[in-house]
Amino acid sequence: MSHPAAYRASHTAYATATAAASATHLSKVYGQGETRVVALDSVSVTFRKAEFTAIMGPSGSGKSTLMHCMAGLDSVSSGSARIGDVELSALKDKHLTQLRRDKVGFIFQAFNLLPTLNAAENITLPMDIAGTKPDPDWLRHVIDTVGLSGRMSHRPAQLSGGQQQRVACARALASRPEIVFADEPTGNLDSRSGAEILSFLRDSVRELGQTIVMVTHDPVAASYADRVIYLADGRIVDELLRPTAEDVLDRMPRPAGHPR
Amino acid sequence: MFRTALRNVLAHKARLMMTALAVLLGVAFVSGTLIFSDSVGSAFRNRMTKSLADVAVSVDSTDGSGKGGKSALDARLADRIRALPGVSSLRASVDGTTIVADKHGNAIGNAWGSLGANYAPGPDGKDSRYPLKEGHAPANSREVALDTKTARHAGAGIGDTVRLATDGPVLTKKLVGIVTTDDPRVTSGGSLALFDTATAQRLFLTPGHFTELVVSAKPGADQARLTRQVQDVLPKEGAEARGGAELAAEQSRAIDAETRAIANTLLVFAGIALFVGIFIIANTFTMLIAQRTRELALLRAVGASRRQVTRSVLVEAGVLGLVASVAGLVLGLGIAVGLRSFLNITGAELPDGPLVVSPGAVLSSLAVGVAVTVLAAWLPSRKAAKIAPVEALSTVDQAPSVRSLRVRNAIGILLTALGVLTMLYVATLKDSGGLVPAMAGSALTMAGVIVLAPLLSRPMVSLAGRVSTRLFGVTGKLAKENALRNPRRTAATASALMIGLTLITGLTVAGTSANEGMDKIAGQDLTADYAVSMATFGGLSPDVAKKVAGTPGVAAAVPIRSVGFQIKGAPALMTGTDVSAIAEVTHLTFTSGSAEGLGSGGVAVSETTAKAHGWKVGDRAELDFYEGGKEHPRIRGIYADNDVVDDAVASTRLASRHISPAKDDKVLIKAAPGRAEGLDKDIKAALGGNPAIKVQDRAQLRREDAGEIDTILNMMYGLLGMAVVIAVVGVVNTLAMSVFERTREIGMLRAIGLARSGVKQMVRLESVVISLFGAALGIGLGIFLAWSSGHLLRSSFPQYSMTVPWDRIGLFVLIAIVVGVLAAVWPARRAARLNTLEAISAQ
């Protein structure tokens, strides 16, 4: 696994049996009685290894909730959420935190870098927290891939938004997590920077064999994915493989009150 | 705008809590002090008024005190005053020092409060000053009465034998009566023994004489006229008559002056506490305004003027200050009550009385609280006014622009340099004349360091951070980075802690050095094993030295008596002693000549004295004694300056010619080899177990001075403790603000795998780093100031040399770390409990 080429997966990888993460009859309910809101209603989905999945859906469809539950950031009301073969609902906070640290990468809409650390320190932060040493070859490769080799000693304030998000991507990938969750990673970027980030994410799946799950409501962003899952009212309503932007737009569910 | 300000206070209740606490504590200190001193002052005045209620005229003797003395107040004079029209009764009293022994022969109470007096029955056969509780009044020379407390300490009941001493040998008397008294000398830690008038006169004066005559007037008599009449019958000299009203006014003034002096001392410390509070208030308002930038810009955009924005911030501060001050006032009432009980427990015996809450105390406490808060919020409020309306329109939160510290650093360097230069100048001075520059220099240096603190924070916090990173890894590094993120805030927080620690360290170093100096005095020249001296102010009868010398195990008992004289107008002291034995109790090193020949009328002088007057061995010294006599003894020796003897040493016989009555100040004792242990008991026994005579070993002699310094130091610690507590509140405040501001970061850290314990540790380490920064500044500055000011003592206290008590300094550092950890408890828990999801999406 030391050479990135080893990750190069054939793109007919649907045959790959092992799942990076999966949900089975996953439900998430907020509140009780009259204020009861079902955010996820018995969702079952599998995120396969080395696949780039986009979760789409209108506001309130449950797409963020699904991601939070799958990433171990939020608790599950019923059903099961697994990363690899670890059942998340069985874990207490301490182990969930360890699991996030060791097996999950995050990319947020608002970059969420520590302003006090420079780019290099931000990238190695998860490993510093874990107290492990990053693999230097891999780290260099990731940094080269995001194209920031010259800016490693810059602090976030000295970087543009696109550059900051590339640092965040590198941070998510640097510890070779089993799965990376990206929450609207291009939401705060101009279209050019956004395209760079999305290409980078797609490349990391194709070339490095990374598994990525991305929540977005931008059809263009979703078109970079291998697979698009549509959520509405807490359920999976549609799925699309190897889409183009037009495909994604065409298949958008249009519930009343949400004209698109 | 007022409503906006009020709403803001309510909206930020939690965040303002720590600030309010800081104001509250400061105001509580101020109001507690004011209420306490008012109450105690009024209680003292009440008691005084009561005790002076039937004093129309008081006649005091102005000379002839002491045993064998003849005061101008004799029985004939008393009778003549009694016969004056308008006089209803006269109480003739005679008093002096009387030490009562407890079961073990030790003195009860402190020497200056050990009162002996006559029981002076009035026309009804009772003495109104000392109401009898039990038994009867002493009626002859074998009887004595004690007050309740003294009797209890002596473990004596009616009919028991009591041992006591005035300035002579031990007296044994039968306890016949127990009285109560409200004499402040007795109630505040002294003791009381009452004799019949003839016995008291024999003990304290001469039969037939008194120390005070108290005249009561007939109803309707004019006090001023009566005073004049009394004055007319008094002899020209030796007595003085004063009206009761005049006496009351005088004592009232004295009480006021005393309580005010205490209050002023306490208020200085309250002021320090409030000053520390300023940093916390300023920190809070700076942060609140930074957070409300858009809101304030909106106000400006809809037409509020700069002044209105400033005013709204100041009103907010005022409301906060007022609320906190009212709460502080309530706490202050509690402090005033508590302080009195506390002091009473420790034996101060303050009189009871109602709590006096004067409008002045209330108003000034509230005014101080509000003023301090508004003042502290003033700079932040000006920043608020500078917010441009256009900032309301910006959609993203802009990072607050970091204002340059250049001007601040320049001012800081200037102030610090001025302060340090002043202190270095002070270090070259040799006497207490440098007190004013020393205080100014200290204040300047402190102010300079406070202004410079943001600049200093970078290297010092980085250093601490390197250690914390080494020890705790990434949380240590994040803690360091967080502490460095806002240098102004970190500096203000640390400065608050620094102020208290500077004073504490400075006082500790000075106190320890003084103690060491005293040790040197007590230790270096003295070779005696024990010293015998009088617990009262009188000297020892020459018998004592003889008795001690005869005690088995005593190798030498050397009497020491001092007498003042002049050499060509320059004052000096002579030690009269047993010149043949003085070498047993002190290292007397002769630089020329020797002690030989001192026994036959010669004199030895110290090196300093010899040098000052150009004397050599063989010269004749011209000594002018204060009481009139002159001596021209030959100088037999010159010795290196010595702390046991004075400027000159001569035989007891020579010195005693100029001392009356001839008494020893002390007797220094050298034990026979191997007999030192426990010899004090034998000596005490040889002296008849006299409670008025102290036998002290070397350690006790040393402790006598050291104890005083330690007591003062402990009091200072207590008083400065409040400033430190407020500084801790400031650290809590800063951390809480940091956690609040960094909610999203903490959420992200949790998401990417930092455990709750890691978050806690990060906040805790930030707290420790800030505390250590403050401690380092405070301790460094304290040592520097103590070093430079210490030179002022060189002339009056040559043995003083600076000693840094590293164990205590280490303790302070440890305390700073503990303070850091404790201050972080609540903010760290809050940070760790943040919901990860909500935190990430927080603004």
Image: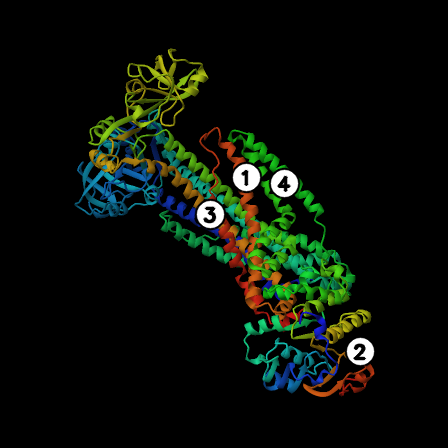
Provide the residue designation for mark 2: A220
Judging depth in this view, the residue of A224 and B572 nearest the camera is A224
Residue at image position (31%, 24%) is B583
Are circles 2 and 1 on residues that touch, CB within 8 Å? no
Are circles 1 and 4 on residues that touch, CB within 8 Å? no
Q: Amino acid at mark 3?
A: Tyr
Percent of width and height locating residue B811:
47, 49
Provide the residue designation for mark 4: B416
Are circles 2 and 4 on residues that touch, CB within 8 Å? no
Identify the mark nearer the N-term, 1 or 4.
Answer: 4
Provide the residue designation for mark 1: B785
Q: Amino acid at mark 2?
A: Val
CA distance for labels 2 and 1: 69 Å
CA distance for labels 2 and 3: 69 Å
Determine whether B67 is above or below B330 in the image.
above
Q: Which is in the foreground here, disc 2 or disc 4?
A: 2
Q: Amino acid at mark 4?
A: Thr
